[in-house]
Amino acid sequence: MKRIRADENRGGRGSKVGKASAETAARIDANSRGQVEDAVRVIIRHMGEDPDREGLKRTPARVASAYEFLTSGYAMDPKEAINDALFAEQDYQEMILCKDLDFYSLCEHHLLPFMGKAHVAYLPNRKIVGLSKLARLVEIYARRLQVQERLTTQIAHTLMSQVNPLGVAVVIEAEHLCMRMRGVEKQNCYVTTSAMLGAFRTHTETRQEFMQLLRNGKP
């Protein structure tokens, strides 16, 4: 489904232009959604099924809606999500860690889910960000076609550039259904990726403190 992305074409030349643009976008989106539903019908036929039988009649529309939700991050601007919740804080200069943030994403290679937990930490530099915005940042990037490696670095670099902390650390642990349901079919495989920026990369003690905090509460 074609969308007007949140980080594209901001502003306009008056309400008439804005209204016309919205109407055009709506027509494009409706046409695009119809194409998606037609494509799903083709896939169902390719599987040897009848897309017109009772149980499958509404499946193309359901699939289109599902993918709109699962890729809704394309229509969200992660920078805006952070910038409306930045607060001055002169006194607190220790690590802030938000761990075990559940997420679900789609592998861009097979369009199969991968899911797990994200752990996000930063060292504030006279500014802090609302804690819910860390979860929102993970969600925005996860609801796109992704690979785990890029998801990890996007979260880290966006937090670093928008909050300007002394350092950022992100660790993601995930299971990939493209490895469990097909291919090598390894049922107990988890993938861990990390991104360390600023003090977390240059200071061993800071990195070790972060890893220790991640282990706390785990057997």
Image: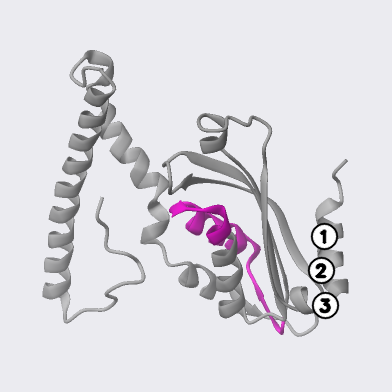
CA gap, disc 3 and disc 1: 13 Å
Residue that numbered label 2 is attached to: 207
Stretch of the chain drawn in magenta: 125-151
Where residue 79 sits: x, y (%)?
48, 72
Total marks in image = 3
Apparent side of residue 75 relative to residue 98 in the rendered image (left or right): left
Q: Which mark is residue 211?
A: 1
Q: Residues within 10 Å of mark 2 (few under 14, many from 20)?
A: some
Residue 44 found in image quarter: top left
Write the residue at 51% across / 33% down: 183
* Amino acid, disc 1: Met
Q: Is residue 128 magenta?
A: yes
Q: Are marks 3 and 1 in contact (CB under 8 Å)?
A: no
Residue 60 found in image quarter: top left
Q: Which mark is residue 37?
A: none
Q: Residues within 10 Å of mark 3 (few under 14, many from 20)?
A: few
Q: Are marks 3 and 2 in contact (CB under 8 Å)?
A: yes
Where residue 69 sits: x, y (%)?
39, 45
Q: Residues within 10 Å of mark 1 (few under 14, many from 20)?
A: few
CA gap, disc 2 and disc 1: 6 Å
Residue that numbered label 3 is attached to: 203
Q: Secondary structure at mark 2?
A: helix
Please state which of residues 33 and 107 is positioned toward the viewer in this rendering.
107
First in sequence: mark 3 vs mark 1: 3
Write the residue at 29% across / 22% down: 47
Residue 111 visible at all? yes
Residue 85 visible at all? no
Q: Are marks 2 and 1 in contact (CB under 8 Å)?
A: yes
Where residue 154 sits: x, y (%)?
54, 66
Q: Secondary structure at mark 1?
A: helix
* Amino acid, disc 3: His
